[in-house]
Image (spheres, rainbow, N blue to C red):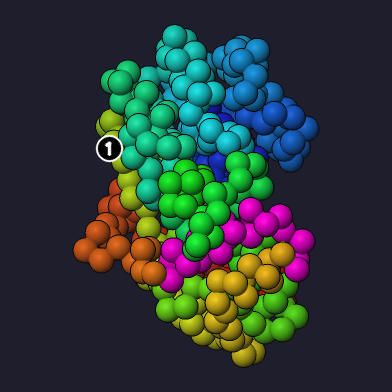
Amino acid sequence: MTILLTGGTGKTSLQLAPLLTQASKPFLLTSRRGPASFPADLQAHAVTFDFTDESTYENPFKAAKEPITAVYLVAPEVADPSPPEIAFINFAVERGVKRFVQLGGGTAVPGGPFFGGAWQRMLDLGFQSTVLKATWFNGKSSHVAYLHKPFIQTGRGITFNEVEYMVQYSRVDDHLENFIQEYWGFNESIRKEGKIYSAVGDGKSYYQSTKDIARVAFKALTSSIPPPGEFEILGPEPLSYDDIASIFTKVLGRKIEHVRLTPDERKKQHLARGLPEHYADLLVWLETYTAEGNEERPGKWKDDIERYTGQKPQRFEDWLKENRTAFE
């Protein structure tokens, strides 16, 4: 049994690889650039694959020493990933794949935009599948940079339908390691100014670790028991940016302040750092969405991570202790 990990250079697939190695589970990692995209110790597990190039679909199945029976689906970096994902799902099923685990966004629904098309196709086929509904997690991805579709301008900046289409892609890119990634600007302002700028206000979210997502994905891919249809994967505690600034202060041993900006001020800050306007609009929308309380999810919180994996999810403070050198 070989497990195919698409999005092979992404954080969650790279976290899955050592888990599969430790469990002696054969796996393959995909990349559009092939083995050269990976460290030397992973190149033997790598294969050239591109969701948007059907001529590469056969490559993993030729490379696998044992039949591929499960696939970890990470959306390709295109404006609408459903058509290529569905094309590959159909191809994989014809070659004996019986289980799919899809990395999705917190607002994803079957048949909905972005992740929803592939999800609905998996349901229609009736095979074992699960969707990991993650929000604000600790990982690195470049997906947002590929959102070419322009925003529709309104009095508030952008329409809900347009943002909802795009935000389901990008919210999988919102995570604790956002504090390291350049596009948010957190890393530089924390190191140089001791400040975290945001338009989040008092809004809270459940930040989670890519390690936790990988643990859930590992069990869903490898367990003899069919996985549940979906997981809402949330971090262990709702945190505001004031809370986060306090944790930074504690771990780094110096004062870190959360500076509250208006959405317009935050957009100007992004533009001044050289981000395209539509990208700046998206990042500001994500923060104002959180500021309005949409990520707090009262009454909906489920501890899927601990229940399913037997391990408590990683706390922000513990993650920061592991990554503190990035802010020093």
Residue 190 in the image: above or below residue 173:
below
Q: Which element type, helix, strand or loop, lies under badge 1?
A: loop
Residue 165 in the image: above or below residue 116:
below
* Nearer to the camera, 26 or 155: 155
* Nearer to the camera, 296 or 5: 296
Report the amino acid beneath label 1: Pro
Q: Is residue 208 left or right of residue 178?
A: left
Residue drawn at 27 percent across, 37 percent down:
228
Residue 218: x %, y % from top left: 43, 40
Residue drawn at 58 percent across, 36 percent down:
79
Residue 133: x %, y % from top left: 38, 47
Residue 15 seen: no
* Residue 203 counted in the magenta span: no
Residue 162 seen: yes
Residue 204, quarter of picture: bottom left
Q: Is residue 182 left or right of residue 282?
A: right
Split into 4 quadrants, where in the image is the C terminus? bottom right
Residue 99: x %, y % from top left: 38, 25
Residue 276, quarter of picture: bottom right
* Nearer to the camera, 136 or 280: 280
In the image, which residues are magenta? Answer: 272-291
* SS assignment for the magenta stretch, majority: helix
Residue 76, quarter of picture: top right
* Residue 274 counted in the magenta span: yes
Residue 114: x %, y % from top left: 47, 37
Q: Which residue is mark 1?
A: 228
